Image: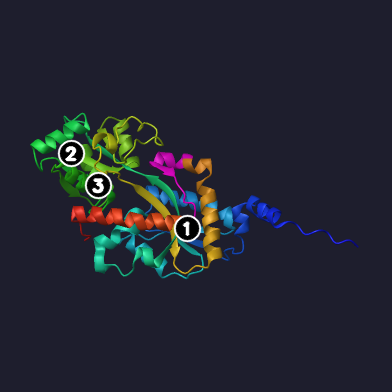
Amino acid sequence: MMQAPPIPRRLLLAAALATPSIARAQAWAPSRPIRLVVPIAAGGAMDLTARMLGERLQPILGQTIVVENRAGAGGNIGAESVVRAEKDGHTIMIAAANTLAANKFLYGTRMSFDPLRDLAPISRVSSGTILLVVNAQRPWRSFQELVAHARANPGVITMGSSGTGTTSHLAIEKLKRVLGIDITHVPYRGGGPAIQDLVAGNIDMMFDVMPALMPHVREGRFRALAVGSAGRVTYVPGVETIPSMDELAPGKGMNASVWYAVVTPTGLAPAVTQTLFDAITRVVRAPDFGARLSPLGFEAVTDESPAAFGAFWRSEETVWRELVEISGARAD
């Protein structure tokens, strides 16, 4: 019998590349439910994103995804539980830039772990920015008018935030420095109480995440003056016309970024990491996932590889270190 000629290596490689990445990564498959840790309380944008992600991961990975909220210490309690988890792929976490890149500078020696050392990158899943709003009864109808009033009346304008060291707090401190203005920061224990005080007129402004603020903008209680990103926001309906930081403070390096990413304990086998990366990016790159993120004030974002996200994460540490140093903030 004549032996069939060997298949050329280039054809084998082409066939491998044509195979869906999730199939190629199935050298590992989870053997029990996967715990998806959310290091904040239920109900916010991160929690909703985690539940959307978990729902879509289940049929791909063939296991139940159990979302577990472990709030406290700016996300450190949940993150530490992941650091200490088994290194087998059955515990993952979705976390924000604050927890992954800022907390080590806010908490210092009070943190028992180093996020970049003790957590491993998988991929970002979303990115967004913050919105600067004022009580609609205040006279400032533009960002320029707000800045002019702040210069003429140092410390008189009050800005509420969801807490010391949050993105909104750190961003306003940098804005104050680069523009030479003085606005008084009023930290609250969560965004809800701050919004209530802004509605009541007890504070003047907020610089915070869009989903909580936009309903009040649409109903006329707040006036939106700026977005915190360098460029305009095109992925959230009704925000496209609001000026960006590059327009309002050109050349000042203002670009407030809020991103969520999936990480794991360090030490996973490469096949486990690749399987998780392929499954997560497959979910996030689907059009319906991005469509559901938009009302939350985010757009879907993934990285080319876990290593690419790791490089981005390291670069973000420099950004957040600068913001913390400028603000002088220290976590309680």
Quarter-of-image position of residue 202: top left
Residue type marked 3 = Ala
Quadrant, the N terminus:
bottom right
User: Can see residue 10?
Assistant: yes
Q: Mark 2 falls on what kind of element?
A: loop
User: Mark 2 touching mark 3, by CB under 8 A?
Assistant: no
2 or 3: mark nearer the eye = 3
Q: Which residue is mark 3?
A: 171
Residue type marked 1 = Pro
The answer to which of 49 and 8 lies nearer the viewer is: 8
Percent of width and height locating residue 7: 75, 57
2 or 1: mark nearer the eye = 1
Q: Which residue is mark 1?
A: 306
Quadrant, the C terminus:
bottom left
Residue 204, numbered label: 2
Q: Mark 1 falls on what kind of element?
A: helix
Report the Cα–Cα distance between label 2 and label 1. Answer: 42 Å
